[in-house]
Structure formats: C-alpha cells, structure tokens
Amino acid sequence: MPQMKAAIFVEPGRIVLEQKPVPDVGPMDALVRITTTTICGTDVHILKGEYPVARGLTVGHEPVGVIEKLGSAVQGYAEGQRVIAGAICPSGHSHASLCGFHSQDGAGTRHGWKPLGGWRFGNTIDGCQAEYVLVPDAMVNLAPVPDGLTDEEVLMCPDIMSTGFAGAERAGIKIGDTVAVFAQGPIGLCATAGAKLCGATTVIGVDTVQARMEASRRMGADITVDFKAGDPVDQIMRITDGRGVDVAIEALGTQATFEACLRVLRPGGTLSSLGVYSSDLKIPLGPFAAGLGDHTIVTSLCPGGKERMRRLLNVVASHRVDLRPMVTHRFKLDDIEAAYDLFSHQRDGVLKVAITP
C-alpha cells in the first residue's frame, strides 16, 4: 500500500511526522496532493490537548493542492486541476447545510446538536498537514484556483479569510460605519480587511504588538489603538467623540476583549464574536443596558463549501485584498515539528507559516 508523510497527533504536547497509508478514494471523494498548507491556532489547541481529537489523526485544515485522483461519481473536475477546499467541508444535504449554516453540518441529533459539525479535516477525519488529503463530498467542497494565482495568495481562503470576513458580514456592516476590531492576529486582520470591503469608512484595529498594528493598517485599518498605551475603551470613545462604534468585532476569545467590545458599542450596535472561549462569559449589566440597549450579539464559525471558496477566490483574484504578507515563515513538511514550535510559542514575529511537502 502506498505510504505518505503526515503530521499526526500522538498525545498532548506531541504532533509528529510519521508514515501513513495514502487514503483510498470513494465514489464521491477526491484525493488531493497538497502543495501548500499552514498551521492554525486551533491546531495549537490540539497540540496542547486543549481540544480533543483522536490519537493518530492527521491534523490541519487549510489545503491548497492538485487533484490526484477523482472518485467514480465525481463530475465537473479533472485530475491535475489546482483546487482548494474549505476548512469546513459540508455534506450539502444535512438540515444545517440546507439552512445555509454549513459550519454546523451534521450537528443535529434527536438529543440536541453539537457545534462544529462541518469541521472535519483534522477534527473528525484526517487533515491536510500531509502529502495527500482525502476530500469528502468533493463536488460540494472543491473550488478551482483561478489561473495566475499563487498558492500563498489563496492559502488564507480555506479558514482565516473566511472566518474573519464572516465576522464582518454577520455584523451587517454598512457603508459609512465605524468598526473596532479587537486583536490583530490572523483572524482579526482578516476581519479588519473584511470590514473595509463591507463599506466601513473608519476601521479601528486594537492590539499592542507594533508589527501587528502595522499589518492592521495594511489590511485596511484607518486607526490603530495600542491597548497598553491606555484603556482601549477610553481611546475608542475619544476617537468617536463619545458616540461609540457601530460594530465591534471580538477576535481573541477572552472575557476582557468581549466586555471591551460591548463597552464601545453605540446604542443599537452589534458585537460580532469570532473568538473561541475557554470559560463562561459574563455580560456586564451597565454596558448591556440591563438588556434594554437594542444591542445585537452574533457569533460566526468559518463558512465553507465551494461557493464560499469561489467568492473568496474572486476577492483575491480582483486584488481587493492581498493576504500574502501574512505568511511570515516557510517550512518544509519534513520540518513541521519545528514549525509548530515556532508558531505555538509565537516567536520571531510569526503570523502564519506556509508548509510545503
């Protein structure tokens, strides 16, 4: 049986490169040869044992590659074609998918529902930090890469671009809005870019790392706020002359940033939450106006499927956004353990790493 290299979860604290069999291709599947992938913050949670996955699972959920083999029932694609697939790869026929919430695909049971149902790569099936990945329901999930675009230009589409843009879209940003984005890591930077594309005319990026604030301005932030230079809520209220922002996007996943987002909202404003929280959130009585402030709180999980990917690829191809500068480091798959060490410890100004087999 043919073998391939793959980064697998062994136990908390250990993701290692090992040999695994190349997957068999079912009728509705596609085998994709990975040309570039990356490491996500969620993969670091898996590494640390903070998010449970099966031992021996291949990790990673951001594939760019070439179709190596198509299932017998797959139509509309060709072997040798360059493609991406979203981190969320829905079946297309579940209740959640048919309601338009692909990220929750397969989540419902008669006992209730479980979030993240559409996130399969590196969660419930083998992922793409490997030489090959098996893409299920290929006709729902594979999106051709337009000619002329490089792997690094489209590398953010499967996850962080889709997630960050969703934070702006779900917030209903309108032309002329003022938006604050708390935390300018990869997701926050994409939310900043998404807010600008949605029509916001004043985007405020909040962080304290100089390189990330510079990146925020490149992604579309009009103003950056250093939260170590003073209370960011006070700074934003001064910037808006006490009015507050129309939309605040939380992109870190902490009580402090969630509460700060609520405190900077104008009456009737929207808090768009992208963070993954590790403990219960508390909503402070005053900023929430005891529930009478006409506020809206929305949450988003990375939208997936080929139509979502097609739209994001169009944005990249039209040069409305350039996410290549987010790739700050490059590694071969053989060196993925070193890549994890760098990325998990956030050394050397790392934003995203590109992994090439």
Image: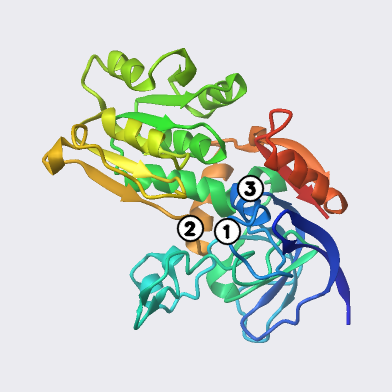
Q: Earlier in the sequence, mark 2 or mark 1?
A: 1
Do labels 2 and 1 touch, CB within 8 Å?
no
| Position of residue 85 in the picture relative to residue 94 (left or right) | right
In the rendered image, the vertical position of residue 315 relative to residue 229, given as above or below: below
- Amino acid type of the residue tagged 2 in the rendering: Arg
Instruction: Give the number of the disc on residue 87.
Output: none
- Quarter holding the N terminus? bottom right
Which secondary structure, mark 2?
A: helix
Query: Residue under circle 2?
Result: 308
Q: Earlier in the sequence, mark 1 or mark 3?
A: 1
Query: Residue under circle 3?
Result: 154
- Amino acid type of the residue tagged 3 in the rendering: Val
| Position of residue 178 in the picture relative to residue 348 (left or right) | left
Residue at 25 percent of width and 24 percent of height: 244
| Position of residue 68 in the picture relative to residue 263 (left or right) | right
- Amino acid type of the residue tagged 1 in the rendering: Tyr
Residue 20, percent from left and from top: 83, 72
Query: Residue under circle 1?
Result: 51
Which secondary structure, mark 1?
A: loop
Query: Depth check: 292 or 71 in front?
Result: 292
Residue at 26 percent of width and 40 percent of height: 270
